[in-house]
Image (cartoon, rainbow, N blue to C red):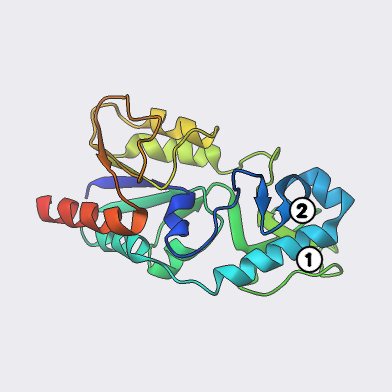
Amino acid sequence: MKKIIVLTGAGMSADSGLQTFRGSDGLWEGYDIKKVATVEGWRKDPERVLEFYNKRRRQLYDVDPNKGHKALMRLESKFDVTIITQNVDNLHERAGSSDVLHLHGELSKARSVKDKSLVYEIGDDDIEMGDTAEDGGQLRPHVVWFGEMVPNMEKAAQIVPKADTLIVIGTSLVVYPAAGLVDYAPSDIPKYIIDPERPDIMPAKGWQHFEKTAAEGTPELVDQLLSDH
């Protein structure tokens, strides 16, 4: 069974109605990203950080997977599919995809500030000050903040070279370290990118561009791949 690797970014979730994490003004619903998505922000005002992520978590459960998420699930009928996502939402899983690697953590989970291996599924529940893990450590969002290491990057770098086909959806792939993942893919495999705008990686040869949103372009590409198989 041929291996398809899918790299997804904010554009994938935007079609479900989720606001992109970071606007051009560096704000998200009035929150300064530097104050709520950094270790420094957490140390200075953890209650504000928890409030920010509680609001994002509630918003997540008010939306549903879009046609793009659901189309990727259909690929599993004929291909071995791994999705590597920069998104912290669980829309891929809720659409039925069975193999999803989150580079930047998961909004529906919490972890101890003492032992990062103590991770808990919390769904849409809030995290409050005083909520602790079994080691007594305060619970924090299980997400990667700016300036923190991306723990799953090494794992992703080991997966991408196994691709027989590479699909990039809803990300310009200009932010490192995630942007470097495409370089691990074999040079001679089919590569597709779905984005309404022409991405910066397009000058590289071998890419086919679907100039559409994730919800529009993904079902079209999936239908094409399934019919060609």
Residue shown at the point (67%, 75%) measured from the top left: 125
In the image as oriented, which residue stretches furthest toward the left?
Answer: 228
Q: Is residue 195 above or below residue 52?
A: above
Image coords of residue 182 (percent x, y): 40, 33
Can you tell which quarter of the image residue 97 is in?
A: bottom left
Looking at the image, residue 37 sits to the left or right of residue 129; the answer is left
Label 2: how many residues lie within 10 Å, few (<14), some (14-19) or many (20+)? few
**CB contact under 8 Å: marks 1 and 2:** yes
Label 1: how many residues lie within 10 Å, few (<14), some (14-19) or many (20+)? some
Query: Is residue 120 at least partly visible in the picture?
Result: no
Query: Is residue 85 at least partly visible in the picture?
Result: yes
Q: Is residue 28 above or below residue 24?
A: below
Residue shown at the point (26%, 63%) measured from the top left: 74
How many marks can you see? 2
Identify the mark nearer the N-term, 1 or 2.
2
Image coords of residue 11 (percent x, y): 44, 51
The dot on residue 227 is none
Looking at the image, residue 49 sits to the left or right of residue 163; the answer is right
Residue for badge 2? 115
Image coords of residue 129 (percent x, y): 85, 67
| SS class, disc 1 | loop
CA–CA distance between discs 1 and 2? 9 Å
| SS class, disc 2 | loop
Can you tell which quarter of the image residue 29 is in?
A: bottom right
Q: Amino acid at mark 1?
A: Ala
Residue shown at the point (77%, 58%) measured from the top left: 49
Residue for badge 1? 133
Image coords of residue 216 (percent x, y): 29, 57
Looking at the image, residue 7 sits to the left or right of residue 76; the answer is right
Q: Amino acid at mark 2?
A: Asp
Q: Is residue 33 above or below residue 138?
A: above
